[in-house]
Image: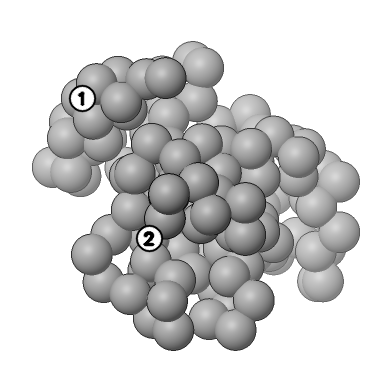
Amino acid sequence: MYLVSLSDRVVYCGNPVHKRNPGDFGLSPPAGPRPGKSLCDTAAIFEKAVAGELLKEGARRGLVSRQVNNDWPQNIWAVTDDGMPLEAQLENRETGAYHGYPMPPTDPFVELVMTEWEARRP
């Protein structure tokens, strides 16, 4: 029940440091990729609704961190239809807004995210 409630309440807001192409995210500033930051563009997610649905699906499947900030998990993970693992990080602990980015392939947590995403398929 908690996961369904969480998935209904989380919001995807994006973050300009992870964007080269701002798509329809309405970010301010529009885009400002920073060296060393992974870019959402590599996941080919240019629509805020798509990013939001992935965030909600990650919450529904229970791919959430144990670390909680004001009742919001610090991180939520998801996987695109193309098999790219994503990590969302809490941006606003009052509203439950998150920004996300592709996980680096060298991250040892990628394998667990991929395995759990498939194991928890509805």
Residue 66, image x, y percentages: 23, 64
Q: From the viewer's perspective, is residue 107 above or below residue 73?
A: above
The answer to which of 23 and 10 lies nearer the viewer is: 10
Q: Determine the residue positioned at 51% across, 56% down.
A: 6
Q: From the viewer's perspective, is residue 87 above or below residue 66?
A: above
Residue 111, image x, y percentages: 17, 31
- Whether residue 27 sits left or right of residue 84 in the image: it is right
Q: SS of the residue at dot 1?
A: helix
Q: From the viewer's perspective, is residue 66 above or below residue 43?
A: below
- Whether residue 16 sits left or right of residue 60 in the image: it is right
> Is disc 1 surrounded by few (<14), some (14 to 19) or many (20+) residues within 10 Å?
few
Quadrant of the frame with the C terminus = top left
Asked whether residue 19 appears in the rendered view, the answer is yes
Image disc number at residue 75: 2
- Residue farthest along the front direction in this orientation: 1
Q: Determine the residue positioned at 30% across, 26% down.
A: 120
Residue 67, image x, y percentages: 26, 71
Q: Which amino acid lies under the numbered mark 1 shown in the image of this protein?
A: Thr
Image disc number at residue 105: none
The answer to which of 71 and 76 lies nearer the viewer is: 71
Q: Determine the residue positioned at 44% across, 71% down.
A: 72
The answer to which of 37 and 95 lies nearer the viewer is: 95
Q: SS of the residue at dot 2?
A: strand
User: How many marks are shown on the rendered structure?
Assistant: 2
- Could you tell which of marks 2 and 1 lies nearer the N-terminus? 2
- Whether residue 23 sits left or right of residue 54 in the image: it is right
Residue 68, image x, y percentages: 33, 75
Q: Determine the residue positioned at 51% across, 17% down.
A: 81
| Residue matched to label 1 | 115
Name which quarter of the figure residue 33 lies in. Answer: bottom right
